[in-house]
Amino acid sequence: MIRPFSFFILVALLFAGCQNQKNVSETTEAKADTSTLIPLETQLRAIDTHFSTDSVQLSFTVLNHSDTVQRFCKWETPFEPLLGKYMEIIDEQGIEAQFTGPMAKRVMPPPTESYIQVQPHDCVSTVFNLAKNYTIKPGKYTVNYIGGGVSGLQKGNEVKIVINGK
């Protein structure tokens, strides 16, 4: 027969085990909730249909389709337009336009002021001149956002553009 003192210890151990089980379960549920969060979407759009080798105005939009405020780091995005290679520009022959803009080494992790918040079911946009950081010759190109790494944003749509002479 179990002595009252031993019974008390057994009940305490079982109760503690159940409590630990519950905490592990709650932690797993919290992780599952963040993993089901709808990721921010990126959209690239041409502002005009007439481009020259020194003026290629594009719009970059980040959309939040979720019910929660989300944020992204503006590094490696057009929200910090003159710093870093975050676009892929390929001509009809498959040749990539040469990046001529500045690159930067950054302090990690990014400071708080490096993030932009996007409200639920809202978006943020910026317009930038692609020709400021790339050598673009007359011809047909496909442009993609490829930043991703530090910003946390995913590759979005591609834009087809035609560059005329100056």
Image (tube, rainbow, N blue to C red):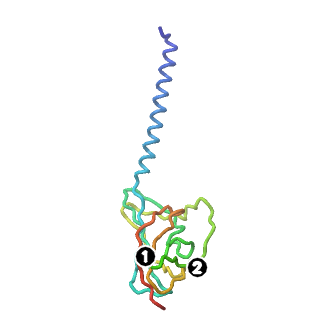
Identified at 58% across, 61% down, the residue is 111
Crowdedness near tag 2: few (<14), some (14–19) or many (≥20) residues, C-alpha within 10 Å: few
Q: Is residue 45 left or right of residue 136?
A: left
Nearer to me, 157 or 75? 157
Residue sticking out furthest to the front:
93
Please identify, in this view, whether the residue under mark 2 or under mark 1 is nearer the observer. Answer: 2
Which mark is first along the chain, 1 or 2? Answer: 1
Residue 44 percent across, percent down from the top left: 42, 73
The picture quadrant where one finds residue 18 is top left
Circle 1 — which element?
Answer: strand
| Residue at left offset 36%, top offset 62% | 121
Residue 88: % across, % down: 50, 73
Amino acid type at circle 2 is: Thr
Q: From the viewer's perspective, is 35 left or right of 105?
A: left
- Residue 1, compared with residue 101, is above or below; it is above
The kind of residue on which mark 1 rests is Ser
Which residue occupies the foreground of this view, 59 or 23?
59
Q: Crowding near pointer 1: few (<14 within 10 Å), some, many (20+)?
A: some
